[in-house]
Image (cartoon, helix red, strand yellow):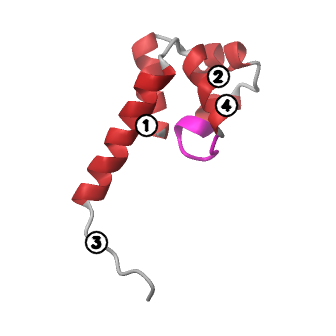
């Protein structure tokens, strides 16, 4: 998800500082989120999408597709071992 948010920010033509200002968060917040150093909860994700002017439902569908792609390209793992 972090990479998708980074791509979306670039597509929106925004800097990390601009996103941070829109979110009313410290300047380091977008960097940490976009580089996987900080996880965000669902409310923060909704706010992030609004800051990037993304449709939350469409973004969630992108995340779902990315997860499905990862799962289909990864070898199965043993469970219960």
Mark 1 or mark 3, earlier in chain: 1
Q: Mark 1 points at which residue?
A: 3
Q: Check disc 2 and report the residue beneath it.
A: 47
Specify few, some or many for label 2: CA neighbours under 10 Å numbering under 14, 14-19, or 20 or more. Answer: some
Tell me if residue 74 is in the magenta stretch: no
Q: Is mark 2 on a helix, strand or loop?
A: helix
**How far apart, in angstroms, are the residues tagged by discs 1 and 3?**
24 Å
* Residue 55 x, y percent position in the rendering: 47, 17
Position above or below: 46 against 15: below
Q: What stretch is highlighted in magenta?
A: 32-40
* Residue at image mark 4: 44
Say which residue appears at 23% left-offset and 57% top-offset. 73
Measured Cα–Cα span from mark 3 to mark 4 = 32 Å
Question: Marks 4 and 2: CB-CB under 8 Å?
Answer: yes
> Could you tell which of marks 2 and 1 lies nearer the N-terminus?
1
Of residue 76 and residue 2, the one placed in the foreground of this image is 76
Report crowding for label 4: few under 14, some 14 to 19, many 20 or more residues within 10 A (C-alpha). Answer: few
Camera-nearest label, 4 or 1 = 4
Q: Is mark 1 on a helix, strand or loop?
A: helix
């Amino acid at each position: 998800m972090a990479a998708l948010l980074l791509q979306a920010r670039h597509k929106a033509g925004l800097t990390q500082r601009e996103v941070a200002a829109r979110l009313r968060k410290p300047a380091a917040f977008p960097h940490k989120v976009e580089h996987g150093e900080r996880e965000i909860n669902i409310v923060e994700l909704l706010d992030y999408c609004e800051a990037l002017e993304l449709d939350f439902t469409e973004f969630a569908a992108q995340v779902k597709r990315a997860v499905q792609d990862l799962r289909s390209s990864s070898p199965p793992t043993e469970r219960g071992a």
